[in-house]
Image: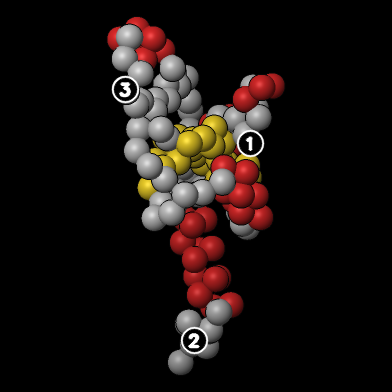
Amino acid sequence: MKPKKILGDESVQVSATAIRIPVVGGHSESVNIEFENDFDENEVRKLLSEFPGVTVQDNTSVNTYPMPIYAEGKDDVFVGRIRRDYSQPNTLNMWVVADNLRKGAATNAVQIAEYLLEKGYLNNTID
């Protein structure tokens, strides 16, 4: 890691993400998650890729990772750059991108209502 090299201090723990792109729509987030127990990055990728509405794009060796242009006009949430955060134990960083006009607004509300109806949490009859 460059901060360790620049500062000459191996004890410095940094996890950083920098993305600079102009976008018309969409939102991106660097998400930091602390787990109670240790985890396997490949297991996290597998679980996320199996989750409905999530698309994993995580192959930095060929520059495949989420960008707002991929999410534009789509309902999925795109996740990538999944990596261990070495600044604290049991912590993961990932980059999350979605079309904020679809996933961050009405589509989300509709999908939540559909899920609640499917699971029987809402009465689907009108009195």
Q: What's the residue at 57%, 42% (across, down)?
A: 41
* SS category of the residue bearing label 1: loop
Q: Position of residue 30 (x, y in %)?
A: 42, 35
Q: How many marks?
A: 3
Q: Residues within 10 Å of mark 1 (few under 14, many from 20)?
A: many
Which residue is more in the foreground, 12 or 106? 12
* SS category of the residue bearing label 2: loop
Residue of label 2: 123
Q: In which quarter of the image is residue 64?
A: top right
- Residues marked 2 and 3 touching at CB (< 8 Å): no
Q: Does any portion of residue 100 appear in the rendered image?
A: yes
Q: Where is residue 43 in the image (x, y as percent from the top left)?
A: 61, 49
Which residue is more in the foreground, 49 or 42? 42
Q: How far apart are marks 2 and 3 (CA)?
A: 54 Å
Query: Which mark is nearer the camera, 2 or 3?
Result: 3
Q: How far apart are marks 1 and 3 (CA)?
A: 29 Å
**Disc 1 residue type?**
Gln
Please indicate whether residue 77 sits to the left or right of residue 49 in the image.
left
Q: In this view, does 29 lie above or below 115?
A: above
Q: Position of residue 59 (x, y in %)?
A: 65, 30
N-terminal of the pair, mark 2 or mark 1, is 1
Residue of label 3: 12
Q: What's the residue at 43%, 54% (across, down)?
A: 37
N-terminal of the pair, mark 1 or mark 3, is 3
Q: What's the residue at 54%, 37% (across, down)?
A: 82
Q: Distance between the residues labelled 2 and 1?
A: 37 Å
Residue of label 1: 57
Please indicate whether residue 40 sits to the left or right of residue 37 in the image.
right
